[in-house]
Each structure stands twice: as C-alpha cells, then as structure tokens.
Amino acid sequence: MKTIIFKKLIKQGIGALLLLVLLNSTYSCQDDYLDVVPDGLATVDKVFNLRQEAEKYLFTCYSYMPRLGDPRRNAGFLAGDEMWVPDNRENGDYFALEIALGRQRVSNPYFNVWQGEYQAGAPYDGPEIWDGIRHCNIFIENMSDENNVPDITQSERERWIAEAKFLKAYYHFYLTKFYGAIPVMRENISIDAPTEEFDVTRAPYDEAIAYIVELLDEAAAVLPPVIADINTELGRITSVTARSLKAKVLVTAASPLYNGNEDLAIVVNKDGTPLYNNTYEPNKWQLAADAAKEAIDAAEAAGLRLFEFNESVTGFDLTDTTVTKLSIRNAITDPESIEIIWPNTQSLTLGEDGLQASAMAPLQVGHNTRVARKVLSPTITMAKLFYTDNGVPITEDRNYDFNDIRELREATPEERFNIEEGYRTSRLNFDREPRFYADLGFDGSTWYKRDALGDETKWHIEGKFGDYSGSDHPFFFNETGYYCKKLVNWRMTFSNDGGSFENYAWPEMRLAELYLLYAEALNETQGPSSDVYNYLDLIRDRAGLEGVVESWANHSVNPNKPLSQDGLRSIIQQERMIELAFEGQRYWDLLRWKRAVEEFNDDVQGWNVFGDDEASYYQVRTIHLQSFVSPRDYFWPLSETSLIRNTNLVQNPGW
C-alpha cells in the first residue's frame, strides 16, 4: 500500500510534500514527522480522542508560521534594495540576497517557498508550507466532528477550528505573495483518490483571494477580540488579527499588480482558464477600505493604540528628542507594545546569530562582534527616503539643499541628541525627521540604550574602517555605512563575555500599518479627504511631524501635492515605506504597486566603508547594479521539478 501511495506522490508535485497527502495512518512512521503527531501517537484518529492531544495538534498547525523575525528567513528584508549583507559564506548563507543579486533560477530556485528549500521552509528547511495547510485541513475536519475530543467545551472547539481556518488562510496568502495564482487546497485529497486528482491546477488569483477572505470572515466571527491570558496564549489568533489580515489581503488584491494588470493576460492554465482578471475593478478598493475600517474599529475597541514611550519607566529624565525616538523604536521592539496586533511568538528575534545581533553595532572598543555583527546594512536609497525635519521629502523641501551628500557638516550642541556633538558627518544625516534618527545609525550618530542612563551619556557610532563600529572584521562587516537601530530593543547590554538582548516576538501586523492600509484604500476610492489625512497624521504626530497638508503647504516646493489623488498616493506610499522601513514590507509593496521595475533597476549604494578617513569614507560606493526584469521578476518561479511532477501546473511568466 505504501508503495502505491508514494508512486502517487512522485507524480503529483504540488511540492515535495503536500503531500504526504494526507497519510493519516502512515506518516507517523517517517522520522521527520515524529514530532508532528503529538506524543508519537500512531494515527491521527487517536490524536482527536483527548483535548490535550488535540491542542498539541493545533500547535502543530501554528508551527508552520514563517520565521519572519529571522533575517535569513524573511525574503522581504533582502530580496530588494532596503538592506544589504556581505555576500560571503563565512557570514552565513542569505538566500534571499540571491534574489536581489539577480541570481534566481528555475532549476532549484533560491528561497523556494513552494518546496520549503533554501531557508524558505517553515519552521526549517524540508517541510513545506503546503504541509501546514494539510495539517490545518486535518485539524478542521476532525474537530468539526463532535464525536471527536469529547472532553472539550463547545466554545473551545469553535475557537480552535477558527484558529486553524485563519492559519490556513494565512498560509495560502503567504504563497500568493511569492507565486500569485496558486492551487487552493479547500480539503485534503483522499489517499484512495485516482492518481490524476493529485495533479491539481492553479486557481485563478481572485478565486484564491475570495476563499482566503471567506476563511478569515469565518474565523473572525468566532475568535475572541483579545488574548485573555498572555502568559499562556500570547501569539494566538484573535478576531482583530483575522480582520487585520483580511484588510491586508484585500488591499493587496486591489493593487496594480493584480487589479487590471494587462501584463498577466497571457497567464492561463493548460485548459485556457485565465489566472488573472486584467480588467481594472475599482470596487476592489472599496472592499479593501471597508475591511480596513472594520479592522481599525475592532482594534481600537480592543484597546490597541499607537505606542508612546513612558519616560517614567527609566527612572531618569530624557529629552523630548530621545522620548520620540524611543516611541518609534519600541513600537516594534517592546515585547508589550500596545500597538502590536499580531506578535508571532513562533519567531523570536533571537540574540547571537539572530536578528538583533545582525543589526547591532559595537559602540566602543572591545565590544564583542558576535553579538554586534552590524551586517544588516540599510542602503543610501533608504537613507534618502526619510523626510526632512519639516516632514517632506528631501527633494521637495524648499528650505534645504541635499544635492551633494558628500558635503560634511559638524554637529552643533543643539544636535547632540541625534549626532555626537562636534562630529563631522554627511550632509545627508542632518535636518532629518525623528524616524531617520530612531531607525538608522551612521558614522557619528547617537545610539541610545537603557544602560546609557540619561541621554547626555549616550553611546555613539564611529564607523570608518578601523573604528570600533567600522567594517574591518573579515566577515561581520557593514556594507553601506548605515546601521539598523530600529530592530534592536533598547535594553540591549554588552558584557565581558558578549552581551544580552531582550527578545520580542516578530510583529506580523501593527496598528500603524492598518492606518496606512485604510488611508491608501480610501484615497483610491474617493481621493483626498479628511479621513485620509487623519489617519496619516496620527502616525506623523507620533513621529514628531506636522500634518500632511500643513507640512506640504509650509515647506514643499509642491504645496498642493496632498490635494490631488495622484499626489496623495505618492505621499501615502512614501509614508508607508518610512513608517514600515526595515520590517520586510518595502519589497512586497513595490511589487504590488508595480514600481519594482523602476526601483530595482538602479545602483545599490553605500558609503565607502573601507575608507579610514573622512575624505575616503564619504565617497558613494556602488555595491551592486540591480536588474529587475518585468513581468518575470514580479513572481517567483515554480521549480522544474514541480512542473515535471505535476504536468497540470503552469510556469509564471518569463521563467
């Protein structure tokens, strides 16, 4: 019997394992799955005899969550132009960087989410996200049978089913980000089905989105709005989470890549079924706006709000400048941030060899480079993206000239809480908004941490070659001269034997993003309005900036820009890229806006980090000349192996 099953598996090929397709009675004999079936039980039916074992199976469904708090496992960090890392094996493999380098391939693709390879597996390479969907289907089917798990309350049963539906929806959506149209696995294929049933086809994109939304609606109707006991349930799904993901799904589906994109008219299944509707549908934006507003109302009713740092927790006085920066940073990194809608406790931002160590820089001679690797390097493109202190782009501010970023200035006493007093650094690093100084470190910038006590005794970076933050380490070095402060919790401390970090769960979604999704969708449905300005201004106020209309009227060479739909669209997109910088969002946003072909065909640049004095360091260095081919590079390729195994699958355009 096993031989017959595995012959079917070899032929079908949704991915290498979708399919151990539901070997309800056989997969437990595979060593790789001994930790999947709770307590090594021999068959799935025994799992659903008791509440305790069924709950463990629910946690198995959660275990396939992508580890987006791992710099190697979040493609959004490195597949575009937001951050760079040294391209050397001693520093460890970063397969998402291969995408940014233009090395993606059809044979054995890098960061292969479809088959769980090259750091794309969840929770580790090998199991595919399709397996997560399979386990969700098993769980939903068995828990829906009220003869199973007799020792559970009805409310618990309904809640657990809703959690599995959410996870199933999320896993489908995650796959669509990479591949566009995908097969929709509403239920598992019986092991007794004819072989041809395993040769599934890709569903039209809008059909997949409709099914994802259906699952999220069903989940939101049942799930609680908040987690009652954060000690035992932190990270589990709430109705607010489900509604928020629905808003993000619908905004994505309404965006130019998927809504009226004529480039995709050629993509059809082998029976001629179109996989994308290339007719623009404005109602998609209305559905997205309605979903975002519903999610915002639910989030605020549940007590969520934009994070503001409470100075009293420090025990010492801090300037308004430092408090504002801590509000911005801790919105992400505080484990108890009131702004986080969905903390992914499956993905902690671990210290050494993890996200925070990869972002942290040494701040004095002798600091251990294994806990301050500084390899996550924001590009000059990102440094230019942030606003001036007047709240408008550097190319539009009529009060400042940023044409020559190699020009150096010396920090004044008034600037000492952002740049070390008396330090000379690039003109690009002066007169910038608080989020620039909160998110980015650079040669001469301050880096405030709790162990500095008052902000007059802050740390600062010295980043030239040979300096304590510089790039003279053989493989832990910074590529651009910019450092990612945003992702490091302010309680990080150095010690004689290394250092320690306060870990936080990766924030899959936070309230600020919901505000931006709503503003974007609302502008697309009705153009500029007081509601659009209001939600943008809530975020800008936390960032220490004036409102959109006031900032452009008072400081921009284009004062009427916020008053037109096109102008406001540009503002909303830049606001989103600033507010969500270094959270793995920019890459996906530029794809869905169909702007990647513009942004990813340019030089990836940084300072000459191998220069040991001002004259040599402050030269713009081209690290890589990117090449993005449209429409090919808007989607990941399916591997040749998958296409051979399942002849009903069609390849993405251009591959």
Image: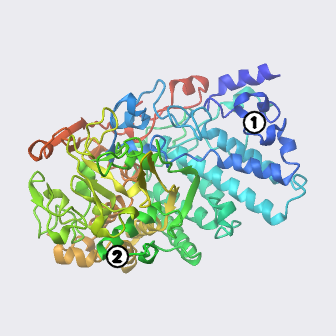
Residue 637's place in the image compared with 432, above or below, is: above
Q: Could you say which disc has been placed on residue 22 in the image?
A: 1
Q: Which residue corresponds to the image point at 83% horizontal and 33% vertical from the top-left?
A: 25
Which residue occupies the foreground of this view, 371 or 560?
371
Left or right of 491 on screen, residue 598: left
Q: Is residue 528 visible?
A: no
Left or right of 274 on screen, residue 452: left
| Neighbours of disc 2 within 10 Å: few (<14), some (14-19), many (20+) | few
Q: Position of residue 556 (x, y in %)?
A: 17, 71
Q: Which residue corresponds to the image point at 21% horizontal and 62% vertical from the top-left?
A: 419
Residue 17's place in the image compared with 448, above or below, is: above
Which residue occupies the foreground of this view, 525 or 514?
514
Q: Which residue corresponds to the image point at 50% horizontal and 34% vertical from the top-left?
A: 112
- Label 1: which secondary element: loop
The quadrant the N terminus occupies is top right
The quadrant the C terminus occupies is top left
Q: Position of residue 170 (x, y in %)?
A: 59, 52
Q: Position of residue 506 (x, y in %)?
A: 51, 54
The amino acid type of the residue labelled 1 equals Leu
Which residue occupies the foreground of this view, 83 or 612?
612
Q: Is residue 333 visible?
A: yes
